[in-house]
Amino acid sequence: MPNPWDVGSARLLQSAGFEALATTSAGFAWSVGKLDQTVSREELVAHVATLAAATDLPLNVDSERCYPDDPGGVTRTVELLAEAGAAGFSIEDYDPDTGGMDEVGRAAERVAEAAQASREGMLLTARAENHIRGVDDLDDTIARLIAYRDAGADAVYAPGLTDVEQIARVVEAVRIPLNVLALPSGPSLGELAAAGVRRISTGSLLAAAAYGALLEGARELRDEGTSRYAERGASRDALKAAFG
């Protein structure tokens, strides 16, 4: 389940044969010139509506903490995402305002609220952010995911895990579908499937790779005066297949 950040990337991924997509909070933020965790709920909902209409694939939404401090809180956020066309969404337990992890009981309460609000059918993924926020504590991650499962999550996600034995341990412990972030240092998709992982996503990595290619090409043009970067661009046939 790769993560597009705009209409063009969504349609390219559909043309590549993927059967579901997910938004990326960081990739979308970059596309509007912002940093991750700074996009407003209004901006996110408009983005979701645009992407949901861009393809006929199910769309999962990276909705950060589901904006608990906005009017209507988590419940209203879930309603807005459903109205925008989301097939599923995630809720996470890292608070950018404090720079730390939420207390697990409070985070589980938000998961329960999200589960109640999504009873119409959207799939709810609860995230434990430990391993991308400097907390390398697998036992705490498992405890959080179990708490979120018990609060009503349909799937769970601990981005940043790369050791296949640890991933298999999480699969065995949580006993509901586990999403894993595909990282350069992590196992292959085949290894993850063999470990029991049910869903794999790319987070902001595709967006970062695209922006990296842009910067590399710009630096070549500026510093060397050449345009060899264009040799690695998308073919016209690929673009025509996606956009034609």
Image (cartoon, rainbow, N blue to C red):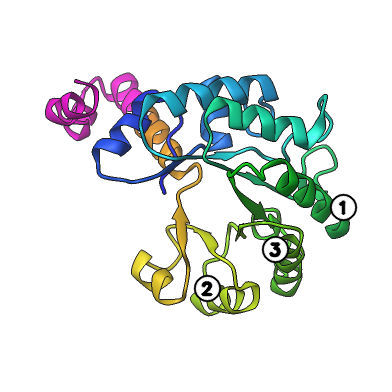
Going by the numbered disc 1, the residue's amino acid type is Arg
Residue labelled with disc 3? 149
Gap in Å between the C-alphas at discs 1 and 3?
Answer: 14 Å
Q: Position of residue 214 (x, y in %)?
A: 36, 28
Residue at screen point 57% across, 20% down: 46
Task: Give the image location of residue 28, x and y in percent.
Answer: 53, 29
> Few, some or many C-alpha atoms within 10 Å of disc 3 (few <14, some 14-19, many ≥20)?
many
- Determine which quarter of the picture holds residue 108: bottom right
- Which mark is on residue 128? none
Magenta region, main secondary structure: helix
* Residue 74: percent from left, percent from top: 77, 37
Secondary-structure class at tag 3: helix
Question: Is label 1 in contact with label 2 (beta carbons under 8 Å)?
Answer: no
Quickly name the residue at label 1: 106
Q: Is residue 127 left or right of residue 49?
A: right
The magenta segment = 217-244
Residue in view at x 69 percent, y 57 percent: 128
Q: Nearer the viewer, residue 15 or 35?
A: 15
